[in-house]
Amino acid sequence: MVNPYVIHPATIVEKIREAEDITTYRLQLVDEEARRRFRFKAGQFNMVYLFGIGEVAISIVSDPDEPERLDHTIRAVGRTTKAIADLQPGETLGIRGPFGEGWPLEEAKGRNVVIVTGGLGCAPVVGAIEFIFKRRNQYGAVKILHGVKTPHDLLYRERFDAWRGFPDTEVLLTSDQPDKTWRYHVGVVTELFEQVSMDPEKSMVLMCGPEIMMRLGAPILMRRGIPATAMYVSLERHMECGIGLCGHCQMGPYFLCKDGPVMRYDRVEQWLGRTGV
Amino acid sequence: MTSEMHGALARADLQRLLDALSAKGYQIVGPTVREGSVVWETISSVSELPIGWRDQQEPGRYRLEQTGAQEIFGVVHGPQSLKPFVFAPREPLLQITRSKEGFTTSPTLPQPEKVAVIGARACDLAGLAIQDRIFLNETYRDPYYATRRDGLFVVAVNCTRSLQTCFCASMETGPRAKCGYDLALTEVDDRLLVEAGSEAGRDILSGFSLPPASEDLAGEATRRIESCAENQVRRLDRSRLPHALYEAHEHPRWDEVAGRCLACTNCTMVCPTCFCHTVEETPDLSHQHTAHARLWGSCFTQEHGYINGKNIRPTIKDRYRMWLTHKLASWIDQFSTSGCVGCGRCITWCPVGIDLTEELSALLTPGVQPPIDLQHKIGT
C-alpha cells in the first residue's frame, strides 16, 4: 500500500534570492530512484518539509521537463517558512508530492495565452511560462501582464526581460505604488487589459495572484468576450495533507489540494466572491 | 439479505456472545457508565454494560437515569461514535530520524487489532460508512484507517427508543441498522433478536445453536423499531439541499447563530463524520528524532482558515457557516452523501444547545428572522 505521508529528503542545491524575504530553493531528491521517478506538471505543488518543524504547500516553479531539479519560491512569512530561510545550500529539506491539478498547457496548444499575475502569485505560473517558451511555435501570441504593489516586489526580473525577447510576445508590468525608478505602467494589473488586444475566441487566460485580482479581473475579461471556460485560476488555501483529507483547503465543494490548485474559472466563479469560503 | 441468519437469544445469555467473540481473539468494547455519561471501554462481562440506565438528551443537556429495569441497551449513545476506532483522535504517522542523507522516515502504522464493538447504533454505522468513503475511496486508501478498520467487528443494536435529539428517520440512516454490521441485536424485553450481517457475523453465530427467532419476536422487534422512528420529534428537510443552503450564504440567520456559538469545537469532536485534522510535528530534546502525527482538527478553530498572514474565516459566523454548509451541502457534492447521519450528538453536546435542524430550517426560510430573544418574548 502506498503511503502518501512518507517524506523524501531533498538537498538544497542552490538558494536564489528573489527579494528581501523571498528565496527560490533549488532542491534535488537525495534518493536516486525517487529522483528518477519524480514527474510533475506546471502548477502542481509539493509539501516541503523541515525536520522537526513541519510541512508547507509550495508550488513547483521550475521546468517540468527537468524534474530532477525542483525550484520552490518561498516567502518567509510563517513558522516553517521562516525556519527554512535559515538553511544553507547542502542542507536538507523534505518533499512529498507532486500534488494537485496543474495548468492546462496541452489544451492551450495552438491558442493565444494571456497570463495575468500579481505579486508572488506569479510563482505558480512561472513554470507554465517556461514550458510555453520552450515550445514557442506550438502556441499563439503570448501576453504576460504582471502587477506588483511596489517595484521591490518584482521577482524574476531577469526572466521577465528574457520573456520579452520571444517572438509574438508582450510583457507588461505595472505597480500601484511605484518609485522613481519605475518605467512601466502605474496602477493595478486589470488596467493592463486595455493595453493589449485579445482575440476572445482564440485566447486562453491563466491567472494567478491575490484572490481579489482574479475576482475583479475575470469579469472584465468576460466582458471582452473571453468565456469563463477559457480562464484558469490558481487558488491558495491552507493545506496540511495534499490528498484531500485534512479539510483545510476547501472552497465550496472543492478540495483545492486535489481538485486544484488550478481551477477552471467557471467552476469557482460563484465561490470566489463569497466571504468566509 | 442481511437477516438470512437470525435467531433468538435470551437476554441473560448475552455473555455467551461476548465469550464467543473473546474466543475468536476479539478485544470487546462496550458502552460503560463514566462521569455521568457512557463511553466506550474494554469489557469482559455483560455486567459492565449500562444495565438499567437510560439517557435523556436535549439541546445542551445529557443526563443518565437508573430505571431499575434489566434493560441492557437502554442508553442510546454517549458522545463517542465509532469514529475514534478507525480515525484515531491522534494517529502517529511517521517516525523521522536524522541520518547521513538528511533523515529517514518510517511509517508508524497501528498494530492490527481485532476489536468487537457492542452497542453501535444505526447512526454510528451510517457515520462509519461515510468515513469509509473519505478514507477508503477509489483513488486513495488511507493505510492507518484501513489497518484499524480491518480489525473492527460491529455488533449493532437497533434502536427501540428515540431521544429528543434524534432525527435519523428523516436522514434515512436509522433507527434500524441496514448494513455495515456484523451482528445486529434488537432487545425485546428479556429476549434479543440476533441477525448476522456479514460472513464474520455468520461465523460467530454458527457456533451458537440459537433457536430461530419466532415470527412473534421478529414482528415485535420491527414494531418497536418503527414506533421509535415515528416518535422522533426532530427532522431535517433534505429536499432542497445542497443548493438552497449555498443560496443562503448571506442569510441574516448566520449572524444570529454566531451570537450564540462559542466556537468550542464540541460539535465537530462528537460528530461521527467530521474528518478535518491537523498534522503535528514533535521533535525530541536531542532533535535527532521527530514524530509526525495527525490529530483531529476543527473548522471552528482560528488555525483552520489560516493562510500566510491572514484568516479566510476570521469570525465565528464564517466558521459556523463553513461547518453547517460543509456538513449539509458541499459534503453531498464531495462524497455523494450528506455529512449528517441524524445522531443528534452536536445538538446534545453543544454547550449552548444550538440545534442544526432548527438552524437549517431558519436558513431555508427567506427573509429576516427576528432575533432569538425576541422570538422568546413573542412566545411568552
Image (cartoon, coloured by chain):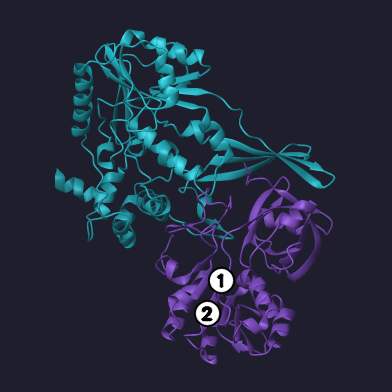
Location of residue B226 in the rendering, given as x and y in whole percent from the top left corner: 20, 30
What residue do we see at 20% from left, 36% from top? B233
Say which element carries label 1. Answer: loop
Q: Is A19 placed left or right of A146 in the picture?
A: right
Which of the 4 quarters of the picture holds residue A100?
bottom right
**Residue corresponding to mark 1:** A104
**Image height of B220 relative to B361, above or below:** above
Along the line of sight, the residue nearer the viewer: B78 or B261: B78
Image quadrant for the C terminus of chain B?
top left
Along the line of sight, the residue nearer the viewer: B116 or A215: B116
Q: Is B23 placed left or right of A75 in the picture?
A: left
Residue contact at pointers 1 and 2, CB within 8 angstroms: yes
Say which element carries label 2. Answer: strand
Q: Chain A is drawn in which colour?
A: purple
What residue do we see at 28% from left, 32% from top? B175
Which of marks 2 and 1 precedes in the sequence? 1
**Image height of B219 relative to B357, above or below:** above
Q: Which chain carries label 1?
A: A
Q: How crowded is mark 2: few (under 14 residues within 10 Å), some or many (20 or more)?
A: many
Q: Residues within 10 Å of mark 1 (few under 14, many from 20)?
A: some
**Residue corresponding to mark 2:** A204
Q: Colour of chain B?
A: cyan
Which of the 4 quarters of the picture holds residue B39?
top left
> Please, what is the three-letter code of the amino acid marked with disc 2?
Met
Query: Taking the image as drawn, is residue B271 in sight?
Result: no
**Image height of B274 relative to B197, above or below:** below
What residue do we see at 40% from left, 38% from top? B127
> Please, what is the three-letter code of the amino acid marked with disc 1?
Pro
